[in-house]
Image (cartoon, grey):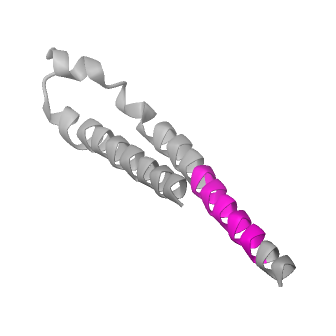
Amino acid sequence: MLADRLFGLALIAWGVGFMTFYLFWVLITPFIPANTPFIALFPDAKYANYLVATVGGCGFIFIALYVLRTKMKEAKKKNAAKKAE
């Protein structure tokens, strides 16, 4: 149970970190002059949509795997309880 919670917490932390980076990239960098070193941390804005689509797809896959893993563990526990009866 603890491993499930840690996995879920890691997914949430990763998502919050990515969204923070993305919000800075899309909402703040267009208003900063191009010659500042801060801009070097971010790729061109044209990649924003590709990155979101890729990360969103991967995030969906990871969440689906997490749910599947949890459901399989619950099914194993139910089967073990039925066999014990």
Quadrant for the N terminus, please.
bottom right
Horizontal arrangement in the rendering, residue 4 relative to residue 68 (left or right): left
**Residue 47 falls in which quadrant of the image?**
top left
Is-magenta flag for residue 22?
no
Q: Identify which residue, 82 or 73, lies in the foreground.
A: 82
Q: Where is residue 37? Give x, y as percent.
A: 17, 15
81 vs 32: above or below? below
Which residue is rendered at x = 61% and y = 57% of the image? 66
Q: Identify which residue, 70 or 16, lies in the foreground.
A: 70
Is-magenta flag for residue 63?
yes
Horizontal arrangement in the rendering, residue 13 relative to residue 23 (left or right): right
Which residue is rendered at x = 66% and y = 54% of the image? 65
Q: Where is residue 22? Give x, y as percent.
A: 33, 41
The magenta span reads 61-78
Which residue is rendered at x = 58% and y = 49% of the image? 57
Q: Where is residue 36? Give x, y as percent.
A: 14, 17
Q: Identify which residue, 1 or 18, lies in the foreground.
A: 1
54 vs 81: above or below? above
Horizontal arrangement in the rendering, residue 27 relative to residue 63 (left or right): left
